[in-house]
Image (cartoon, helix red, strand yellow):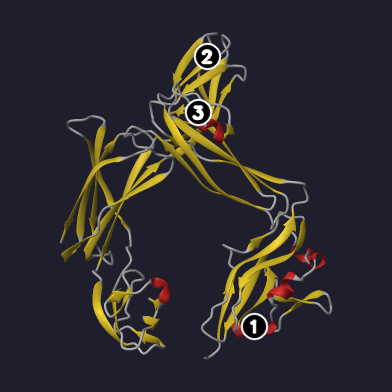
Amino acid sequence: MATKQSLLITTTANRADVSDFPTLTGFAVDETTPDGTSTRYVIKTNDDSATWQKYDTSSKAWTDVATQELTPASVMTEGMSKTELEAVPSSAMTGFVGKQVDVAAAMQTENDSQPTINSVTVKGESGTTLKTETVDYPSITLNDYNAVDILDITVTKKEVGDGKVQVLASIQDADGNWGEYQDYKNYLGEVTTRARAISFRAVFTVVTIGTDVATLNSIEVRSRTDNVAVFTEGTSVCITKTYDFGNVMTRAHLVVKHHTVPDTKLTAQIALRNPPTTVKSELLGTGDGKQKTVKLAHITKLASHGFHLYFDGEEQARDTYSYSPTDGQVTYTATTGATVTVDYIYDWEPEKWVDMTYDNSYPDRKDDTLISEQFDYEAKGDSPTGSVGTVRVTMIQLEGKETDVTLGTGTGKAVSYKLAHHARVGKIQVSPADAKWRYKENTDYLTVTAAEGAEVKVTYEWVARPLALDSLIAVFDE
């Protein structure tokens, strides 16, 4: 079998950033090289003038590789093995301190086996006993108006070496008040915790950079919501089913009905395209017990989904063969005499979303809390058309910050002020500093007790309440 080679090079998205590490100690490589396979590596920094290099054990220094226009063959010939890269001493790492590091890796196989490279790590030390990072996450609303039971909190994390992840939580009680952060397990005792919302804070701690791992994978909260929808901050999207109308569509009209929510907005997009072609039971050949690679009869715009391989009508597991939608090649090993057939999709075009034009809005006749917004689309010039169509509605919660907003003058007694926006919990600052205050999140009223004659001001970050759709109607037209 011919030798096969490939080359991987890091980019700005995945190069190793060690600019914050005062001390670097070496490299660590996680790879698998079955018999007949091998790998090689070359290294450089992201400086404009940097060159690809390898470590020379004879001179105990980094030297340029001969071929700077890297190819799989050049790196396999001139690069370092895993053993050689991991043997680079800490004394040779000073040139990488305060920089970002790029890695080029070549892989080679002499047979059907495949080498894998999981990671190349630059090891270092933070210069302190511990490196700690604290991350606050957006609050999760369990019920807008009533406290509900927290049934369970499940935390999934990864801790390696001396890496630790501590998860803290703060809850909002029935009156809208938030408590101090504490270990999330304190809310899972024999007495059920009731809350309107919950916020999480994670504290990550490691001792040795590059060796210790502290990762928070997920936090899952189960609560008894009594059929009340649960939302978090951000942008949400609603996409209709995709329909094939048979005839080419060039225009569309969309009506979206939703509750009126301040500081939110809707956008709408449409996708029109031609229908793909589905092939059923195309014959590839008859098995002979040996591995075969066959090209499909149609290879134009092959879809990566919808592919199925059958031996005598029995579908084969996906990990027992390979299918390349790039060139339409299928590699499989079928038993002698087995009839090999495939199903697949070609002439498949991905959705290309185009903005619809805002037309008008009007209140609902029966419910004054609802409003209907209209959007239009008409294909012009090279705008997309097609018999296959769908629409997408994006619901956006706006956010911002109000600084030193004057509310009024203190009277020595509690005075309530309606804020212009829905304030983020924990992001409110009231002056004068000695004023007493509390915030009702469900009404956006801030109650302040300040000395008589004192000017009362507030600074706060805000985010809109969640926006949900009540209904939508999309009409497509030729």
188 lies left or right of 105: left
> Which amino acid is tagged 1?
Met
Residue 46 or residue 328, whichever sits in front: 328
User: What secondary structure is found at the residue carrying circle 2?
Assistant: strand
The crowding category of the residue bearing disc 1, from other C-alpha atoms within 10 Å (few below 14, some 14 to 19, many at least 20), is many
Q: Mark 3 sits on what residue? A: 190
Residue under the point 67% across and 49% down: 163
In this rendering, the answer to whether 401 lies above or below 335 is: above
Q: Nearer the viewer, residue 306 or 386?
A: 306
Going from the N terminus, do you reach mark 2 or mark 1 first?
Answer: 1
Evaluate whether residue 71 shows in this view: no
Residue 108 image offset from top left, x and y in percent: 58, 82
Q: Are marks 1 and 3 in contact (CB under 8 Å)?
A: no
Give the distance between the C-alpha atoms of the residues marked 2 and 3, in whole angstroms: 47 Å
Residue 140 versus residue 238 in the image, above or below: above
Screen quadrant of the C terminus: bottom left
Q: Secondary structure at mark 3?
A: loop
Q: Residue at x 30, y 34 (%)?
A: 260
Q: Nearer the viewer, residue 382 or 460?
A: 460
Relative to residue 116, is residue 231 depicted above or below? Answer: above
For residue 136, which quarter of the picture?
A: top right
Q: Report which residue position mark 1 lands on.
A: 76
Amino acid type at circle 3 is: Glu
> Disc 2 vs disc 3: Cβ atoms closer than 8 Å?
no
Report helix, strand or loop for mark 1: helix
Give the Cα distance between marks 2 and 1.
Answer: 76 Å
Mark 1 and mark 3 lie on one chain; the one further toward the N terminus is 1
In this view, the mark in front (2 or 3)? 3
Could you say which quadrant of the image residue 321 lies in? Answer: bottom left
Residue under label 2: 409
Asked if disc 2 and disc 1 are in contact, CB closer than 8 Å, the reply is: no
| 186 sits left or right of 239 in the view | right
